[in-house]
Image (cartoon, rainbow, N blue to C red):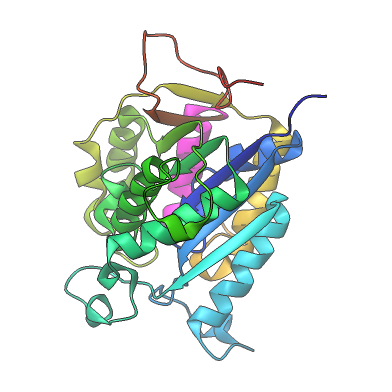
C-alpha cells in the first residue's frame, strides 16, 4: 500500500491559507493527502466593518471562526493556531505589544513549529516567500521561523524537548510570477485602487513586490474542483473581503489575475536545493515512497 502523504502550510494570519495556496491545499486534500495548516496569529489587527462583528466580542474571535470555517472547506486534517497576536504593520502600536508575533523570540516560535513537524511528520512544508510577500512583520516572522524549524526538526540536538527528530522532505515558498504583479500594478488604478496602499487594510505596497523575483521550481496545475473549494474557503473570510459577492475592490483584481495566469500555483523550492531546469509538477515528486 502506498504510504499516505502529509503536507503542512505555515501561514501568518487567518486567511493566508485561503488567499494564498488554498487551491493547492485543496487539491492535495482531495487526493487523500493529510493537509495541515498552522496559523501563527489571530489576525486581531485586521480591519473589520461593524456588520461583520455582529455576534462576536472581538476581531480575534470572529477571525478564529472564519478560519475554522475555511479549514473545514479545505478538507484539512488539522488546523493548529499558535495563538500569537497579530503584529500589524511596523510603526503601529500593535507592533510593540508584548504578545504579538513580531515580539516573540524566533527560537521560541521555531521551537513550537519543530514540535509540530515532529508530531505530524510532513513530507512537504510550505510557507511564505522570503520577502514575506509584502513585508508584513507576521509574514516575515512566520517565514523565518518555519525555515529555521524545517532545518532543525531533523537534528536531535536541537530542541530536544520537542520530541524525537524528524526531517521533512521538502520546503517550498509560495510565490507569484513577477509578470503577473507588474500587470496587476498597472491595472489597479483602472479599478480605483492605489497600488501603494492595497489590500483591505491598505497596508500592501504592490509596487515593492514588483521589484522582487523568485525562481519558480514547481508549477502545480489546479483542477476545477480544487479552485472551487478554494473559493468556498476564501468566502469563509467574509470580514476580509473573501466572499464572492459583488466584484469590487482588491479581490476583483486578484480574481482577474487568476484568470490571466490560469489554474496554477507557483512555488520556489528552498530544500532540497533545486537542480536542473525542469520544473516540478507535483510537490511530492522525487520523495521516497
Ligand atoms: Zn497575512
Q: Residue at coordinates 67% horizontally, 36% vertically from top-left? A: 28
Highlighted magenta segment, given as a residue range: 247-263
Q: Is residue 215 left or right of residue 250?
A: left
Say if the magenta span includes residue 255.
Answer: yes
Say if the magenta span includes residue 260.
Answer: yes
Q: Residue at coordinates 60% horizontally, 65% vertically from top-left? A: 67
Rendered location of residue 156, percent (x, y)? 43, 45
Rendered location of residue 260, percent (x, y)? 48, 29
Is 12 drawn above or below residue 133 in the view shown? below
Indicate the quadrant containing the C terminus: top left, top right, bottom left or bottom right.
top right
Nearer to me, 177 or 115 = 115
Rendered location of residue 220, percent (x, y)? 55, 26
Residue 164 visible at all:
yes
Q: Residue at coordinates 35% horizontally, 44% vertically from top-left? A: 147
Rendered location of residue 173, percent (x, y)? 40, 37
* Res 272 → quadrant: top left
Q: Name the chief secondary structure element in magenta.
A: helix
Q: Is residue 52 left or right of residue 89?
A: right
Q: Is residue 45 left or right of residue 61?
A: left
Q: Residue at coordinates 67% horizontally, 34% vertically from top-left? A: 5
Residue 19 visible at all:
no
Q: Is residue 141 left or right of residue 264?
A: left
Is 273 drawn above or below residue 112 in the view shown? above
Amino acid at each position: 500500500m502506498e504510504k499516505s502523504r502529509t503536507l503542512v502550510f505555515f501561514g501568518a494570519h487567518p486567511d493566508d491559507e485561503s488567499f494564498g495556496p488554498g487551491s493547492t491545499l485543496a487539491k492535495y486534500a482531495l487526493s487523500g493527502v493529510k493537509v495541515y495548516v498552522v496559523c501563527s496569529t489571530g489576525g486581531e489587527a485586521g480591519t473589520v466593518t461593524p456588520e461583520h462583528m455582529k455576534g462576536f466580542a472581538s476581531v480575534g474571535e470572529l477571525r478564529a471562526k472564519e478560519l475554522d470555517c475555511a479549514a473545514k472547506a479545505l478538507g484539512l486534517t488539522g488546523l493548529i493556531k499558535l495563538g500569537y497576536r497579530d503584529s500589524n504593520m511596523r510603526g503601529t502600536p500593535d507592533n510593540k505589544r508584548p504578545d504579538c508575533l513580531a515580539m516573540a523570540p524566533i527560537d521560541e516560535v521555531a521551537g513550537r513549529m519543530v514540535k509540530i513537524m515532529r508530531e505530524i511528520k510532513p513530507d512537504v512544508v510550505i510557507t511564505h516567500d522570503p520577502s514575506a510577500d509584502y513585508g508584513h512583520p507576521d509574514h516575515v516572522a512566520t517565514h523565518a521561523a518555519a525555515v529555521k524549524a524545517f532545518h532543525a526538526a531533523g537534528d536531535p540536538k536541537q530542541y530536544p524537548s520537542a520530541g524525537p527528530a524528524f526531517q521533512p522532505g521538502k520546503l517550498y515558498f509560495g510565490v507569484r510570477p513577477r509578470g503577473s504583479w507588474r500587470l496587476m500594478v498597472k491595472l489597479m488604478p483602472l479599478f480605483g485602487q492605489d497600488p501603494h496602499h492595497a489590500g483591505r487594510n491598505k497596508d500592501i505596497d504592490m509596487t515593492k513586490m514588483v521589484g522582487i523575483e523568485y525562481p519558480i521550481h514547481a508549477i502545480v496545475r489546479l483542477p476545477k474542483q480544487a479552485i472551487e473549494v478554494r473559493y468556498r474557503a476564501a468566502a469563509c473570510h467574509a470580514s476580509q473581503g473573501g466572499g464572492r459577492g459583488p466584484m469590487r475592490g482588491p479581490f476583483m483584481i486578484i480574481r482577474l489575475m487568476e484568470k490571466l495566469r490560469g489554474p496554477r500555483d507557483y512555488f520556489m523550492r528552498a530544500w532540497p536545493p533545486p537542480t536542473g531546469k525542469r520544473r516540478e509538477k507535483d510537490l511530492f515528486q522525487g520523495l521516497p515512497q
